Amino acid sequence: SRLPHAPAAGPADAAPLRGSARHTLGNQAGLLVALLVQNHRRDDAGRIAAAALKAWDDPGFRDLLSQALSGTVPEPWPL
């Protein structure tokens, strides 16, 4: 038997998904950048951070990447 299709997510439903996606992007990009720095690959870390900021230039994301460029690993996500 076929399952009924769920209605497409509307604009009101998308806000939590965007927030989760942004948090995931920040965590993954920050983790990668911090690990590159810790493994003496600062040039690669800088390139990744710059590319990530082109995709999403947000003050909080910029701060997270700045910390990652100093070698600080972000808190795990999801918890």
Image (cartoon, grey):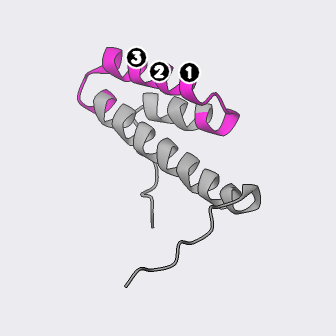
Q: Is residue 45 rendered magenta in the image?
A: yes
Q: Visible in this render: residue 13?
A: yes
Quadrant in which the C terminus appears: bottom left
Q: Which amino acid type is marked by label 1?
A: Lys
x, y percentage for residue 32?
A: 34, 36
Q: Residue at x 62, y 68 (%)?
A: 7
Q: Residues within 10 Å of mark 2 (few under 14, many from 20)?
A: few
Q: Is residue 78 above or below residue 54?
A: below
> Left or right of 44: which side holds 16?
right
Magenta stretch, main secondary structure, is helix
Q: Which mark is residue 47?
A: 3
Span highlighted in magenta in the image: 37-61
Displayed quadrant of residue 39: top left
Contact check, label 2 and label 3, Cβ < 8 Å: yes
Q: Is residue 72 visible?
A: no
* Structural distance between the alpha carbons of marks 1 and 3: 11 Å
- For badge 3, the amino acid type reads Arg
Q: Judge from the rendering whether residue 36 lies leftward or rightward of residue 63; answer left or right.
A: left
Tell me, yes or no, whether the two marked residues, 1 and 2, touch with CB atoms within 8 Å: yes
Q: Which residue is mark 2?
A: 51
